[in-house]
Every structure is written in structure tokens, then in C-alpha cells.
Image: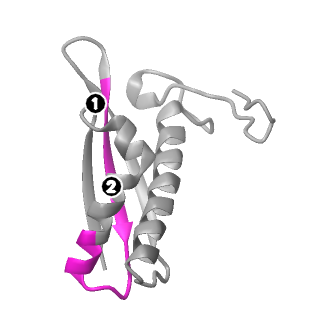
Amino acid sequence: MTSSDGVIDESLAIPKEMGGPGGDKTNPEQLFAAGYSACFHSALQLVARQAKVPLNGSTVTAEVSVLKQEVGFGLGVALNVSLPGLDQAQADQLVEQAHQVCPYSNATRGNIEVALSATV
């Protein structure tokens, strides 16, 4: 798989857990996780900036799962957000606000389950 500008040039493989060869190749779920976590982090920075809350060392990690459904498969996502230096209530509020403005969250809302967690 290669992006039109050549920046992304990766070989794909089905993970062993899904009956594929796995190995040192990426898969669509990893690419989705990378895109979602990067987009969510940008949304988090936006809402924090609007609230005048400095973020120092914040990170977002997305874990994407493939779920068997009655027909075919679906996705599940766990977004794990680390906001060191904030209190828990403030962190939870920023994560919830970011979830409302993130384009990936808006695109997937109602289609896949997204679990949010914030740690301080």
C-alpha cells in the first residue's frame, strides 16, 4: 500500500490472530489506530488551548480491535489518553470535549464502540 505522495509505503499482512501470516508488516487496524490517535491528540490540543489549559507531555494511544458480528466484522477502539499534571476531573472533561470535535470520533460515532480513558 502506497499513498499518492509516496510518504506511506508499507506492506500489509493479516495478523496471525485473524489467520494470516502476521510478521513485520502492518495491517489496516494499526493504520486506523495511528490515524485516530493522531487526530484525537490534535483535537485534545485544540480544546485544551481554548480552555487555556497547558498540556505537557500528553499522549494518546488507540487500541483497535476487530470484532466478529452476526454478519462480517466490526471495529472497537479504546482511546487511552495520558494528561500528566492535570487533575482527573479536568482530564476527563478535556477528553470528552475532544471526543466531540475530533473528526475521527465524529465519523465513527454510532458505528463503532469507542471507550475513552484519561490518566493523569
Residue 79 appears in the figure: no
Residue depicted at x 77% and y 30%: 4
Quarter of the image that includes the N terminus: top right
Q: Kindly identify the amino acid type of the residue bearing the numbered disc 1.
A: Asn
Residue depicted at x 24% and y 34%: 110
Q: Kindly identify which numbered label has been placed on residue 99.
A: 2
**116 relative to 14, above or below:** below
Q: Earlier in the sequence, mark 1 or mark 2?
A: 2
Q: Kindly identify which numbered label has been placed on residue 38.
A: none
Residue 51 on image: x %, y %: 37, 78
Q: Kindly identify which numbered label has been placed on residue 111.
A: 1
Q: Report how many numbered discs are placed on residues in the image.
A: 2
Residue 19 included in the magenta stretch of the image: no
Q: Name the quadrant containing residue 5.
A: top right
Residue depicted at x 36% and y 42%: 106
Residue 89 included in the magenta stretch of the image: yes
